[in-house]
Image (cartoon, rainbow, N blue to C red):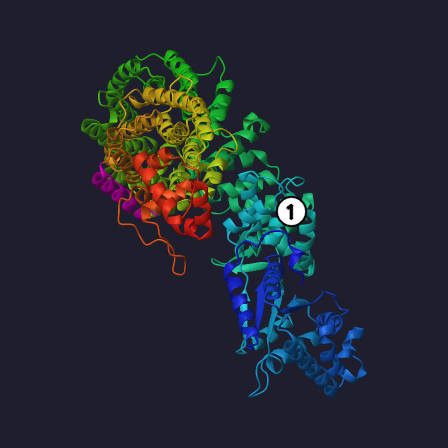
Amino acid sequence: MPQNLFDTPLIGRDDELTRLAAVLDRARVREARAVLIAGDAGVGKTRVLAEAAGRASDRGMTVLTGHCVDLGDVGLPYLPFTEILGVLAADERFAGALAAHPVVGRLLGGGADDGARDAGGRLRLFEGMAGLLSAVTEVAPLLLVLEDLHWADQSSRDLLRFLLSRGVLQGSAGAPGHRLAVFASYRADDLHRRHPLRPLLAELVRLPAVERLELRPMADPEVARLVRALGEGPLPDTTVRRIVERAEGNAFYAEELLAATDTESGGVPSGLADVLLIRFEQLSDTAQQVLRTAAVAGRRVEHELLSDAVQLPQDELESALREAVGRQLLVPGEGNTYSFRHALAREAVYADLLPGERSRLHGAFARLLAGRGRPAESAAERAHHYRESHDLAEALTASLEAADHAARVGAPAEELRHLEAALDMWPAVEAGARPTGEGLDTVTLMLRASAAAAHAGEAHRAVSLTRAALAGSGRDTDAELAARVRYTLADNLMTIDHLSAAYAYSSEALALIPADPPSRTWVWAAATHVMAARQMGDNVTALRVARQALSVAERLQALDAQADLMISVAGLEEGGRRTPEARERFLEARELARRSGCTPVEMRALFNLAIGSFESGLLEESLPWLSEGLDRARRVGLLSSPYPLEMRYLHSLVLYTLGRWDECARAAAADTEVLPAAAGYVAGPSLYVALARGDLGAADRARALLDGPFDWMATLVASIVLTDAAALAGDPEAAVERVRGTVKALTDDAGARPEVAVRLVALALAAVADTAVRLRRSGDEAGTRRWTDTAAELMELARTRGAIGRDGSPQGPEGHAWLARAEAEWARATADPEAGAWERAVTGFGFGDAYEQARCRRRFAEALLADGRREEAAAQARAARETAVRLGATPLLQEVDALIRRGRLTEPAPLGDPGTAPTPLTAREQDVLRLLALGRSNRQIGEELFISGKTASVHVSNILAKLGAASRGEAVAVAHREGLIQAAS
């Protein structure tokens, strides 16, 4: 089996390949083994065997492969073994072995001669084959691969039985074993109850030298990796996700679906459909009829429902089902149900139905479901069947019922799907046939659909639906409904950061209805306008309207609106959400929202409790609120709605900030499984962890967040990672460009720059300062001036955002800490690296950010060394090192260790490995020699080692004397020749 059959990497299957590799290793030391490899068609048996064969070849083994072929009733005896013998005959290494066993030569003509037909001749052939393989293994260790045993002829099965039970695997008593491994594959899904291979497999797996290995379907992440590896270019996440869902772990199906992405629109690719229908067409006519009916029901069908739909006598139905189960097309399940073994098989059978047949069966299922006693639970199924049977009036009614049921069970994505289906069908159904009642008009349905979209995390879809509702509103639209459309649109626009438009629509909503007489619609219009005004920076208007609306909500006893407005007022009053008084109001609002059954407002209260604690530097106190909020959102199906998404990010951010990095990574991995489309919210802080631990792929994963439509949170997260990655790589150009681009992208349409600008500036200034310091040391005045000017520009940006937050309130401890770090980096860039600036940064991050505090400690230690305060520098370096070790922050650890070594802040460790040349130089002279080799001047050496230029000159003179060199260049050459540079590096 050639190793280069496949040009894509093998994905997954690590455990299986480890087992096969162990068998190969045992075979090479004369412990012959066989492995029977089972798996469904397309699951990857051939790919795994190819990989195993390649590894066997790499170990010096000869690989011989025989294929069994489906020849129907015309079978060729010993076909796979004939193929193997043909390969052996072409290899001169084995000419002697073949000559010693002439009986097997009879197979090379394509079959056995008359002498092999009687029992004696057959036994001589089998023994000859065993003897030949034994002889071959004396020339070279052998891997024998037999593919597709489910198609093997009877003679081949008999020969395999002999070889594994009495031949080469067992050997003779007292004789050394053979250097042989046998890998044989077969399709598990082809083995119906009476398949002739089944008894042989049962017999073979009882042998001590034979084991069975089942290749199960690949995990979804592995299929996704395979699809991306096979794609010619980047693939949209939705395409990959759809292929993964349909392939169900089958590699071949995934490849076929990928190949058809440009030509197919959801059906089964024609080539794959042909493969899937082969087994179906081998069934009796009755069994085919039952499977066609089951395919219309869906992937899974209850026995009673199928029986009513197919209308066959019970004995005929049971016989047909037994046949379908025996052929492994249907699988019995719990609750007296049957399921198609693979969804694509069901799709292929369904696609093969005639249009009239399909419509008739859908109608039958719709009527059967309607006659049952569980109308709510079956509404979605009924809607589907009615729609496919072209009864749109009934489908519309059932879709609305399904939407109601989805809302009751907390499934906003499903509610949205059913509402959008209803809206699509609405104009096609005559007015008299449409359902009637309150809220059953297109504008109200669009508003409801927009709310479901928002709760499902589809913010842009929510905006589109609300805009459609606005377009559908006419002059005869009720004023309250018109106001609801506008304030809902305003609310949705704020979610995607379109603040000016949101403010305009919330203003229109308030103008459409009077404040007196009091009404819930006016209260919610006011509550929305409060949020819009606050986002636009008009806190005076926001607080005035909020207090007025809160008073009206209290009179109306509108608890949900009252809770929402209490949160707004608490956040707008002096001190904002960080004060104890504000947290008391948030707690009260949470209880009011809970009593009113308004979960979104309850989520808002819990988020404000958490973010208020975080912004106050009380990180541990924020975690219980986040846990409560996420648990509540999970139970009511609102994990994708705006506030729970914010809580997910904040939860991971708190874990990251506290240095609980492993928990942070685990939380992100779990969240990504649930919410792959919200990657910015769920993966963000875990990317910070990965980068800090030296994972170079973190930047690529962050860059991938920027693919597709603009996403505020994804842009923020990606920019933090990419700016820091550029700084760590010493690329100030990329870091500065990332800051500028991000601030521009995240500046809202009210002109407010994002709070994250302070953090980004501080990160970029690290690279700018490094470059300015290096250029200053080399005497490049123009280059130094360019980067100090850039530092001044960045520092101005940081100072404009460092004092106040986005909503106008003062920055909390985190913002002040990042501003302090930016000031310290700016001082370093402008040749004023005062230790006090770094001390303030270290103190600033003392609110709980372990990693950033450690990074600042490293710079603080450097500044202290420059001031000659060695003991204080050593203490800061030790503290930074302890944190880096605890967090697994390898890049920081390397930087701190380099500083400790250069500054001699601890006793120097013995240099060089055992066996290397001894050095006549002291540890400090070795440090100087390393910098000499880099072309540093005495002054530059002094700056890097925190000594004076004069002291550096003395060390250089000592090195020249000890090495007997007349110049610096000669000293470096001597050091290289004697291995001293390597020993000191």
Q: Looking at this view, is 902 or 394 the one in front?
A: 902
Q: Does 75 appear above or below 920?
A: below
Is 144 placed left or right of 493 in the picture?
right
Residue found 71% across the figure and 74% down from its top? 93
**Magenta-colored segment: predominant secondary structure:** helix
Q: Confirm whether residue 667 shows in the render.
A: no
Q: Does 327 appear above or below 739?
A: below
Residue found 68% across the figure and 43% down from its top? 355
Q: Looking at this view, is 754 or 570 the one in front?
A: 754
Q: Give the range drawn in magenta.
A: 869-890
Q: Mark 1 points at which residue?
A: 268
Q: Quadrant of residue 498?
A: top left
Q: Looking at this view, is 801 or 215 the one in front?
A: 801
Indicate the position of residue 197 as horizontal and vertical percent values.
Answer: 63, 72
Residue found 68% across the figure and 49% down from its top? 352
Q: Which amino acid does label 1 sit on?
A: Val
Q: Quadrant of residue 289?
A: bottom right
